[in-house]
Amino acid sequence: MQPSRYTPLSVASRYLIRQFLSMLLPVTAAFVVLYVVVDFFDRLDILLRHQASLGAATRYFAFKIPLMLSQVVPAAVITAVLISLGMLSRHNEITAFRASGVSLFQTAAPILATCFAISILTLIWSETVVPYSSRQFQRVNNVEIRQRQLRGILSEQQVWYHGTDGFYNIGHVDKPSRTIHGLVIYRLSASFELESVVEVPSARWIDGRWELSGAVERQIGDDFAVRPLNPGELVIPETLDDFLEVQREPEELSFLVLRDWINNLTRKGIDVSEYLVDLHLKLALPFASAVLALVGIPISARVRRHPSIAAIVGVGLAVGFLYWVVLGLSNSLGRSGALPAFAAAWAANLLFLLLGTALFLSSE
C-alpha cells in the first residue's frame, strides 16, 4: 500500500489551516475582550475620579486595542493550536494521518507556516499601527481623561516641553534614577523673545527639588555672555512627574526610531542598557507565536479522547504563562546587565524552540 501523497497545498493541508484559523479568530477576540474588561476595571477608579466622558473612555480603549492585540496573539495562537489539533486527535484524525505514512512534522507544516506568517504580520503591525495607537491612547489618557494641559511636543527623537520659564528640550528622563539628561531651557521674555539658553547636562530630583550638575547659561542679545550657574541659582518649577508625562514609552516608537534614539543617547554618554532590551524585544516578541506553536503541536498530538476543551485551553494558558515567566526573568537579567540585551530578548524564544524540537522528536 502506497503512502498518501501529502503536499503543502494538498486538500489535507488546507483543511488543517482552515481548522486552525477557525479557532484562532474567536480565541483572539475572546482574549482581547477579556483584556479590555480587566483593564477597564483596573482603570475604573481613574475614570470615575476624573469624571471621564463615555467618548473619552471609548477612545482610550479603542486606541489601546492594537497594543492589546499584539500582546495576546502568541497566547491565542498556542490555544488555537491545542484546541484545533486536540479536537482532531480526539477524533483519531491525527492517528489516520500517521497511519497513512504522514509524519507529525508533515502534518504540522501548514500550521507552522501559517504561524510564521502570523509572526511576520504581527511584526509589521507592531511597527506601523501600534506606535501610532499607543501615542493616541496616551494622549487621551493625559488630556481628555486626566484633563491635563498638553504641554509636550514630541518629534521622532526629541521631547519639547512648554514650561514655566520657556521651552524645555529634554534629552532623556531616567525614571529609576530620577534624573534628566541633556536638558536645554530656552528662556523667553514677556514679549516672547529669546533671552537666554540654559544647558543642563543632568538634573536629579531629590527631596522635592532639582539638583543641577554643570548648568551653563548663554545670554542672547547685544551682551552675549556665557556663565556657569551656581547651585540654587536656577530653580525649575516642574516636577519629575511633569516630565515623565511627556516621556515616550518604547511601545510608542518603532524599531528604527527607537534604535536611532538609543544611538543618540549613547553619543551623550547615557546608559541605554534598559532600552537595548526593549529594542531587541520588538523583533523577538512577534515570533513568539511561531515558537509557541512549535511547542503546542506535539502536545496536542498526544491528546486522546479523555481531555476536555477546558483542559486543553488550560494547557495552552499554562505554556503561555511559562513563556512569559521565562521572558520576564531574562528581561530582568538583561536590564540589570547580567545578560547581553540580545540574549535577554531572545532567550525565551530559544528555550521554547529547543523544547518544541525535543517534543517533536519524541513524538515521531
Image (cartoon, rainbow, N blue to C red):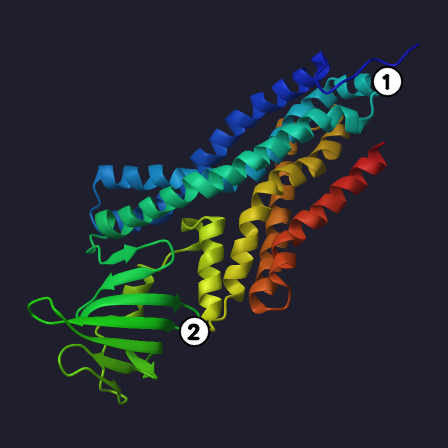
Residue 99 badge: 1
- Measured along the vertical axis of the image, is residue 215 above or below residue 141? below
- The nearer-to-camera label among 1 and 2 is 2
Q: Which residue lies furthest to the front in this view?
A: 222
Instruction: Pick whichever, 300 or 73, lies toward us.
Output: 73
Q: Which amino acid does label 1 sit on?
A: Ala
Q: Is residue 51 visible?
A: yes
**Residue 250, percent across and down?**
44, 54
Q: In this view, does 229 lie to the left or right of 341?
A: left
Q: In what element is the residue under mark 2? A: loop
The residue sitting at 10% across, 72% down in the picture is 189
Q: In this view, does 117 lie to the left or right of 266?
A: right
Q: Given contact means CB atoms under 8 Å apart, are the residues at marks 1 and 2 in contact?
A: no
Q: Which amino acid does label 2 sit on?
A: Ser
Q: Is residue 88 left or right of residue 224?
A: right
- Residue beneath label 2, please? 177
